[in-house]
Image (cartoon, grey):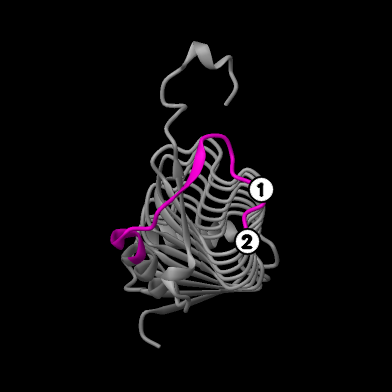
Amino acid sequence: MEGLKQFDLAVTPLREVNRFLHLEAQGAGVRHVKIFNADGAHSIAAGCHAPLDIEVDGHAGYYLGGMNMQANITVHGNAGPGVGENMMSGSIRVAGFASTAAGASAHGGLLVIHGDAALRCGISLKGGDIVVGGNVGGFSAFMAQAGRIVICGDAGDALGDSLYEAVIYVRGQVRSLGADARYEPMGDADFAAVQQLLAASGLNHSPREFRRVASAKTLYHWNADANQEY
């Protein structure tokens, strides 16, 4: 296939693969990269800044696609901690499950996890979109500042603790909301947003099944009279 480059991590060092993605792929006319035998390697395709389609065969370790800009990355397996950490644009799709802190501090782009995501999914989110097909662990969206998180399954403890302007849409049961998080009515814009994100993720649910969680904004300003009872 024209424009296709394949790497086998059982043979080629990851540093060499990432160097190709960073510096050589576009000049070589490559648009599609397949990486085989991921075998839990850390930082696969981290720091990529090119409009590439990257497929990873197998399970990935820490920080897959971290700081991604423009690339569309698909993982045919599970992803370790920090997948899509600080992503700026593009997309990352995980066919399996994701470990802790998926999409942490992401500024843009779309992270799709078809299975479950562990603790602190979307922690400190700064503008990206995250869609989880399954459940999320405790303290997901902790201190999320902007962006949207769609949870098609259940959520663990303290969902949305200390939220800022990020919005969460959750379809399943929530074990507990975090400090300052609250349920709000779904409006037309919310239904449209959920529909658009589900369609982009290849998931088929009715937006009417989701609830909106957002910040009550009681933490925006320090209130000495509250005696730290938040």
Q: Identify which amino acid the numbered label 2 is placed on.
A: Asp
- Across and down, in percent, residue 45 comes to 50, 59
Magenta span covers which residues?
173-191
Is residue 26 in sight in this rendering?
A: no
Q: Is there CB contact under 8 Å for labels 1 and 2?
A: no
Quadrant of the image containing the C terminus: top right
Compared across the picture, whether 170 is left or right of 80 comes to left
Q: Which residue carries the number 2 mark? A: 154
Question: Which of the two discs, 1 and 2, labels the residue nearer the N terminus?
Answer: 1
Q: Which residue carries the number 1 mark? A: 138
- Asked whether 87 or 175 is in front, the reply is 175
Q: Nearer the viewer, mark 1 or mark 2?
A: 2
Is 99 above or below relative to 198? Answer: above
Q: Residue at x 58, y 46 (%)?
A: 159
Callout 2: SS: loop
- Asked whether 74 or 129 is in front, the reply is 129
The quarter of the displayed image where residue 1 is located:
bottom left
Of all residues shown, which one is farthest toward the bottom? 1
- Across and down, in percent, residue 100 comes to 65, 51
Is 178 a magenta residue? Answer: yes
- Asked whether 116 or 83 is in front, the reply is 116
Q: Residue at x 39, y 47 (%)?
A: 107
Is 70 a magenta residue? Answer: no
Q: How far apart in space, not on screen, are marks 1 and 2 (Cα)?
A: 10 Å
Of all residues shown, which one is farthest toward the top? 224
